[in-house]
Image (cartoon, rainbow, N blue to C red):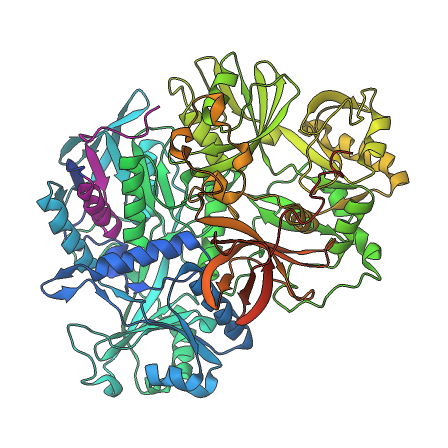
Amino acid sequence: MSRTPAPSSRVVVIGAGIVGCSLADELTARGWTDVTVLEQGPLPAPGGSTSHAPGLVFQTGPSKTLTGFAAYTVQKFRSLDVDGLSCFHPVGGLEIATTEARWADLHRKAGLAASWGVRGQLIGPQQCKRLWPMLDETTLYGGFHTPDDGLARAVLACRAQIARAERRGARFLDRHTVTGIERADGRVTGVTTDRGTFPADHVVSAAGFWGPVIGAMAGVDVPLLPLAHQYATTEPLPELAGVNDPREEASKPILRFQDRDLYFREHTDRIGIGSYAHRPMPVDPFTVAAFDDSPVMPSSLPFTAADFAPSWQDSVGLLPALGASRVAEGFNGVFSFTPDGMPVLGESRELRGFWLAEAVWVTHSAGVAKAVAEWMTDGRPAVDIHECDLYRFEDAQRSPAYIADRGAQNFIEVYDVIHPLQPMEAPRPLRTSPFYPRQQELGAYFLEGGGWERPHWYEANAPLAEGLRLPERDAWSARYWSPIAAAEARATREKVALYDMTPLRRLEVTGPGALAFLQRMTSNNLAKKPGAVTYTLLLDETGGIRSDLTVARLAPDRFQVGANSGADLDWLLRHAPDGGPSRSSGAESGGVQVRDITSGTCCIGVWGPLARALVQPLTRDDFSHQAFGYFRAKQTYLGHVPVTAMRLSYVGELGWELYTTADMGLRLWDTLWETGQEHGVIAAGRSAFNSLRLEKGYRAWGHDMTTEHDPYEAGVGFAVRPAKGDFVGRAALAGRSEDTASRRLTCLTLDDPAAVVLGKEPVLVDGTPAGHVTSAAYGYTLGRGIAYAWLPAAAAVPGTAVHIEYFGEKIPATVAQEPLFDPQMERIRR
């Protein structure tokens, strides 16, 4: 299937806010000039979120992707001006801390900035006061100053990009209300409005909080929740009289007082105050009318003074001069939140040619537009966008109730200090494996991912942790961790443990064309006899790693695929022979059927040196190494339970992944548990699992490698077999090898046995940030911390000394030869 549409493609963009205008500019700059932008309101301020946005651009955050989007937005808007006024005002940003927890978090944020290449500096209370003289510095621990952040003039940026796009041939039509999306044979064909129909090969919904309305017309779910957010402006302040140029409006950094969910910016002689401290105020986009001739924008709802009252008192406490002022005006502005707080981007599989660029804030607007334009014109974005992909959400995460619950919670937590492992509390439990009742009986401590309840350790194993000598952890790394994880890792290395692997996605590919299809889609050679299991990669056309898979050939025309996310299913369905009819559950065409079987199946990993002693008595089949080798699969029975057994191990020990149907899952657990008692079997959780897999050097897609990396850089070049014939990405990898890689995913061990890092920290080579940590854990078998990081190839040499910056502390580490544990693979192959 061609992923590069013809240059003559007709594009209709719905929405002329900052995203739609930026997208029209990016598309026309790439030669797609037949672009029509439809807007229901008046231009250039149509009345959506762009028209009232305060324009704050803070680049630094936990997501490398969003930071990149924001950095491009700054770069682009700084290059644009209207009537001599720049579309970006680089006043900088200042985040302040009034609590120890926030001050520690700002140290972590400074590390993220260094990892992502953003300039930033931690400063003391007096330096904060010099930047913002109205501050009561006695309340401060300090601040984080980012000089390249600032204010985006969103409406001006729209005007500038409209002008550029129009010069290249685009047209912008206001007062056009979309009433329908035309389609034929599974493809979009046009957009109907109250003023006519516009033929199109591609339609992009950039409608902001009206996105669900447009999506409904196309039959496409848009998982976002519009919420109102309070913004107030003070009376003129004597302290600001004559300070700011009226055209520039501001001279001080954007101020964020996140301990009270507040931000501040100047409006010449006034101060604007934004608050996230109030109750969530959801808005039904289907009831919000377009801009009419009223001066009130549809995205600007009446101010609710009672909700703002506590925030005003907090503002006065921070900026005492406000005590002599009051709120002169305010409004509740509407903008979008998704269940995970990330944008929703990509092309619908159900309606080809219908694209989403939704839940995008001004901060990331130009970066998102660039990525979507690249996606449309080149077939892929230049940056990894898996966190934003439309198909990242499971079906269970698409219900209106779930979107409402999680969207509202994201609003509440927008300025909270969030631990990387911290789960949302509701709705839970949502998805549970068949083993859930037994896990509860064992005192499982559950975290959540993809809607699944995932045990991280079991309180039943607490006695095993008694007497273990472990380094004392700092408060941050001790959250969502227990020393029980060390006991579970030890039991896995010494005896045998059961791991719930059910949340990992499972696909079934069947039909006479299944082998040829998978050979074309993946990098390794799958042309093996039934019973073979192969580790392989999904690559894009540039050789970037879209995912890694384990593929078991269970019969000549039946394969079971262990995948990572819904985006993997989406990718396979899009490339199914002849395109095929597309459904969430599967597609059948050209002799190939692709089906998601995750919800109807379950999996237990049985791993440890006593795994064979546990499993063999339960089956008549020979589970010896000679009869059932590593990376082999066999369909058998364990007791009364039909299972598909795969000899795989992600913890570096002997064992099997055992699959059965969901209805037989509890019986499988009980069978293994009862038989395993004489061998000291335990249940073990994800915390131990992550430690063991890093000791063995196993990669986690989405953390350690993405589409931004090729297999040789990521250390998985062994899964590429160019000699097998053509496959997606093969041509792009020609001439590449581990020797040509300019950067590498590198194993580090922390020199201090008591040190711990968690991930995303900057790695310093010769004192200069040179890369960042992708995955990290304490290696309980090794007795020291392990981190994987992207580093320049010149630094990725065993023995090289580096430092990892953790909360401002520079922790010595050393590049290590991998794998750290059992390099000869003797334990797995016993």
In this rendering, is residue 298 above or below 15? below
As drawn, is 60 to the left or to the right of 432?
Answer: left
Q: Position of residue 718 (x, y in %)?
A: 55, 34
Q: Position of residue 67 (x, y in %)?
A: 38, 57
Q: Say which residue appears at 33% left-offset and 71% top-offset.
A: 147
In this rendering, is residue 28 above or below 263? above
Q: Position of residue 797 (x, y in %)?
A: 55, 53
Q: Residue furthest right?
A: 678
Residue 191 counted in the magenta span: no
As drawn, is 787 to the left or to the right of 185?
Answer: right
Q: Say which residue appears at 43% left-offset and 69% top-offset.
A: 261
As drawn, is 471 to the left or to the right of 41?
Answer: right
Q: Position of residue 132 (x, y in %)?
A: 33, 82
- Quarter of the view holding residue 177: top left
Q: Say which residue appears at 38% left-offset and 77% top-offset.
A: 312
Q: Nearer the viewer, residue 584 or 157?
A: 157
Residue 25 counted in the magenta span: yes
User: Which residues make up the magenta segment?
Assistant: 1-30
Q: Report the label total.
A: 0
Residue 511 in view here:
yes
As drawn, is 654 to the left or to the right of 336?
Answer: right
Residue 414 in view here:
no
Image quadrant holding the N terminus, namely top left
Q: Nearer the viewer, residue 274 or 455?
A: 455
In this rendering, is residue 797 above or below 32? below
Q: Say which residue appears at 28% left-offset and 47% top-offset.
A: 369
Image quadrant holding the C terminus, namely top right
